[in-house]
Image (spheres, grey):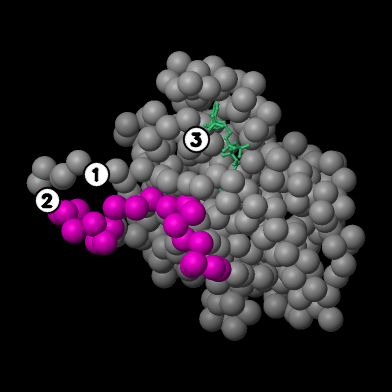
Amino acid sequence: MIQPVGARITGVGAAVPASVVTNADLERLVDTSDEWITTRTGIKQRRVVSENETATGLAVAAAREAIAYAGIAPGEIDLIIVATSTPDNLYPSTACMVQAAVGAQRAAAFDLEAACSGIIYALAVGQQFIGSGTFKTVLMVGVDIHSRFLNWEDRNTCILFGDAAGALVMQAADGENEILATYLRADGTGGHLLSIPNYGTAYPHAGTTPPKAVNRYLHMNGRAIYEFAVNAVPEAVRAACARAGIRVEDIDFFVPHQANQRIIKAAAERLKFKPEQIVSNLDQYGNTSAASIPLALRDALARGQIKPPATCALVGFGGGLTWGAAIIRWTAAERQMTEGFPNE
Ligand code: COA
């Protein structure tokens, strides 16, 4: 049985930095090739912030697009959740900065950290606030600027990530139950497999001036993360479908976290999704962490790949380890969404 939760997605938006870094550009930085990156990951290019661009700036641009798409006034927003692992500062939270910039004066605001699964966690939290009747309108933003934490001399990691923000507006719906179910998991015993260490208070010299030289780059065990992901994604989709009271065969579109095309393909095969059901724009943007799912969703709506009515399985996985899924019945009337980003 589908549990009516009365929350639906009414707005989608995204923003990316203007600067494009191609695989050919990376060939000049590290010992790699376009051929290696393309066959191992599916990534052809990614966007990278300039010196004066920030997570807040990208988040605000994505939020504004989602707010306009939803056709709401910023003053209607009750809660802002920003999912990010790369905030501008430890505090104020990125969510509070977004609240000020978009003029959502009534909204409560906080950041949520679940790495690349962040937007799925945010969806689940927003759904709870709406389902309980506490709030009517929630803005969720996933934003990450991993380029500031990459070792651009490490070919194992620097080729994978891109910077971006994606946003969703969730509203209480009269008689509509478009978020059918969410499913969240975590396994902290695998935390060391994907981490940005030495950034927080576990590093005793964090406050010294000048800061001591320290390796605070992103670290990853690629093979272990790959194995984790190809198992976690099908598990999350099956569990979320079971909670929604639907079969995996009822899913029209698979919107996975965009980390690696081979992971997406392997998971899709296990779930028996056909190629045309897979939403992917990884080739253009790389792994944009918490932003990737709304960025891919926005792209699929703009390209007309997803047309309502459509049941979509959104699936995240990443550092923590964390993973999870949300099943969304996309029934909103099709609205105009252009392929170019408003912030460009
Ligand atoms: N260019 C060329 N060669 C590279 C390279 C690059 N950018 N990166 C690694 N290599 C080399 C390695 O050094 C290794 O060489 P060696 O055998 O001489 O030591 C060789 O390629 C094979 O490396 P391996 O790690 O076995 O490759 P892989 O097939 O596992 O692919 C990843 C590596 C990172 C693409 C893959 O493991 C992966 O996608 N993992 C998941 C990562 C992910 O999604 N992270 C984010 C999750 S949110």
Residue assigned mark 1: 214
Which comes before the other along the chain, label 1 or label 3? Answer: 3
Q: What residue is drawn where x is 56% and y is 41%?
A: 287
Q: Is mark 3 within 8 Å of ligand 1?
A: yes
Give the image quarter of residue 99: bottom left
Secondary-structure class at tag 1: loop
Question: Are dots 1 and 3 in contact, CB under 8 Å?
Answer: no
Query: Which segment is the magenta one?
Result: 186-208
Residue 54 shown left or right of residue 1 in the figure: left
**Position above or below: 189 against 279:** below
- The chief SS type of the magenta part is loop
- In the image, residue 311 lies in the stretch drawn in magenta: no
Which comes before the other along the chain, label 3 or label 2? Answer: 3
Residue 27 screen position, x and y as percent: 50, 18
Kindly report which numbered mark, 3 or 2, lies closer to the viewer in this rendering: 3
- Residues 111 and 45: in front is 45
| Amino acid type indicated by mark 1 | Val
Q: What residue is drawn where x is 41% and y is 45%?
A: 218
Dividing the image into four equal quarters, which quarter contains ligand 1?
top right
Residue assigned mark 2: 208
Residue 117 screen position, x and y as percent: 56, 58
